[in-house]
Image: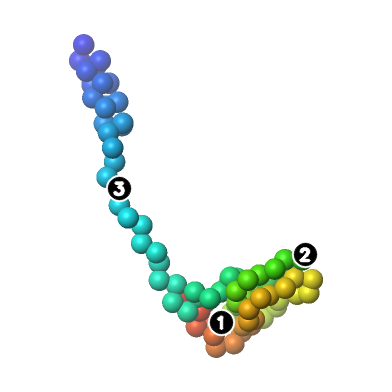
Amino acid sequence: MTAGLALMFAMGSLISPLSASAATQPNLGLATNFAVLAGTTVTNTGPTVITGDLGLSPGSQVTGFPPGTVVGNQHVADPTAVQAHSL
């Protein structure tokens, strides 16, 4: 009887509602405008369309554009990419 009561108590605690907490959006700071932000290399292999900025730091090798397209700015090892990557 005690084992049954303990099991019933354990099952009840599993199905009781858990308290919900609101998720907060992280502060992306200078990385907000980047669709791609990498550290060493960015390699594209097809007709990809990136909408937003592409950033790379400290690396400097971006390949595959074209055939890929960046609808935004490319920041490759420039001060903007360095700052965004330092988050």
Mark-to-mark CA distance, 2 and 3: 42 Å
Relative placement, left or right, of 29 versus 56 is left
Residue 13, horizontal then vertical, whole percent: 26, 31
**Amino acid type, callout 1:** Ala
Element type at mark 1: helix
Closer to the camera, 56 or 59? 56
Mark 1 or mark 2, which is nearer to you?
2
Residue 12, horizontal then vertical, whole percent: 26, 27
Q: Which circle marks residue 65 in the picture?
A: none
Residue 37, horizontal then vertical, whole percent: 58, 72
Mark 1 or mark 3, which is nearer to you?
3
Q: Residues within 10 Å of mark 1 (few under 14, many from 20)?
A: many
Mark before the other along the chain sequence, 2 or 3: 3
Closer to the camera, 12 or 7? 12
Mark before the other along the chain sequence, 1 or 3: 3
Picture mark count: 3
Q: Does 50 appear above or below 58?
A: above
Residue 56, horizontal then vertical, whole percent: 61, 77
Residue occupying image coordinates x 28% and y 37%: 17
- Tell me whether circle 1 and circle 3 mark residues in contact (CB < 8 Å): no
Q: Which circle marks residue 20 in the picture?
A: 3
Residue occupying image coordinates x 75% and y 70%: 68
Find disc 2 in the rendering and name its residue.
46
**Amino acid type, callout 3:** Ala
Find disc 1 in the rendering and name its residue.
81
